[in-house]
């Protein structure tokens, strides 16, 4: 899948070694977020998306950026927070969760791009993150 330019950049690398330094032998595949970059103009961004789940159900996610931290919140049917996940460098997640992360963020790309284009950002330390084809699953 060819990803469009985006205000966030990261790679998903296969993680073969656990925190204890031993190889992971539980038979599951894990991925680690690597080279995470978030465009500073994404500050204050918020979007709610609905994705189809298994067996025709739909799940609502809220994606927002505060203090240069991108957070994904899974909402229950009544709007309560079921799960909250901050996207951080070196964060390790199961392959199925890594795929969900990509799906959720890919769905938000259009609104993220629109949001960053509207920001009047004046900061001498700011350099825009130019991102192309960076959503890699390396396997």
Image (cartoon, rainbow, N blue to C red):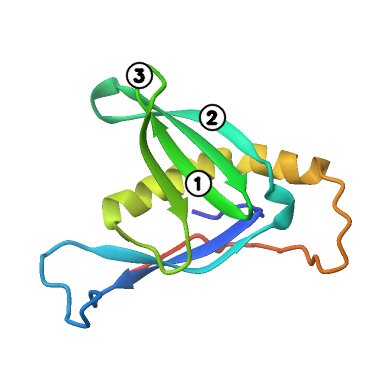
Identify the residue shown where x is 60% and y is 64%: 37
Q: Find residue 77 and name its label.
A: 3
Identify the residue shown where x is 75% and y is 46%: 116
Marks 2 and 3, the one that precedes in the sequence: 2
**Gap between marks 2 and 1 measured at Cα:** 12 Å
Q: Which residue carries the number 2 mark?
A: 48
Helix, strand or loop at disc 1? strand
Q: Find residue 41 and name its label.
A: none
Q: Quadrant of the C terminus?
A: bottom left
Residue 80 to residue 104: above or below: above
Helix, strand or loop at disc 2? strand
Residue 2 to residue 79: above or below: below
Contact check, label 2 and label 1, Cβ < 8 Å = no
**Residue 105: % across, % down:** 51, 45
**Residue 71: % across, % down:** 50, 46
Q: Nearer the viewer, mark 2 or mark 1?
A: 1
Marks 2 and 1, the one that precedes in the sequence: 2
Residue 101 to residue 52: above or below: below
Identify the residue shown where x is 63% and y is 62%: 132
- In front: 137, or 24? 24
Query: In this image, 63 relative to 128: left or right?
Result: left
Contact check, label 1 and label 3, Cβ < 8 Å = no
**Residue 126: % across, % down:** 80, 65
Query: In this image, 52 relative to 116: left or right?
Result: left
Contact check, label 2 and label 3, Cβ < 8 Å = no
- In front: 136, or 119? 119
Q: Which residue carries the number 1 mark?
A: 71
Badge 3: few (under 14), some or many (20 or more) residues near its Cα, within 10 Å? few
Identify the residue shown where x is 31% and y is 30%: 53
Of all residues shown, which one is farthest toward the left? Answer: 26
């Amino acid at each position: 899948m060819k990803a469009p330019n985006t205000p966030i950049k990261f790679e998903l690398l296969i993680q073969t070694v656990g925190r204890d330094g031993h190889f992971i032998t539980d038979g599951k595949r894990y991925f680690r977020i690597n080279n995470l970059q978030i465009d500073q103009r994404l500050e204050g961004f918020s979007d709610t998306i609905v994705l189809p789940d298994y067996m025709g159900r739909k799940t609502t996610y809220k994606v927002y950026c505060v203090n240069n931290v991108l957070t994904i919140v899974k909402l229950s049917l009544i709007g309560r927070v079921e799960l909250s996940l901050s996207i951080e460098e070196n964060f390790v997640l199961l392959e199925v969760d890594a795929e969900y992360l990509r799906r959720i963020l890919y769905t938000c790309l259009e609104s993220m791009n629109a949001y960053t284009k509207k920001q009047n950002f004046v900061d001498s330390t700011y350099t825009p993150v130019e991102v192309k084809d960076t959503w890699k699953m390396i396997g």
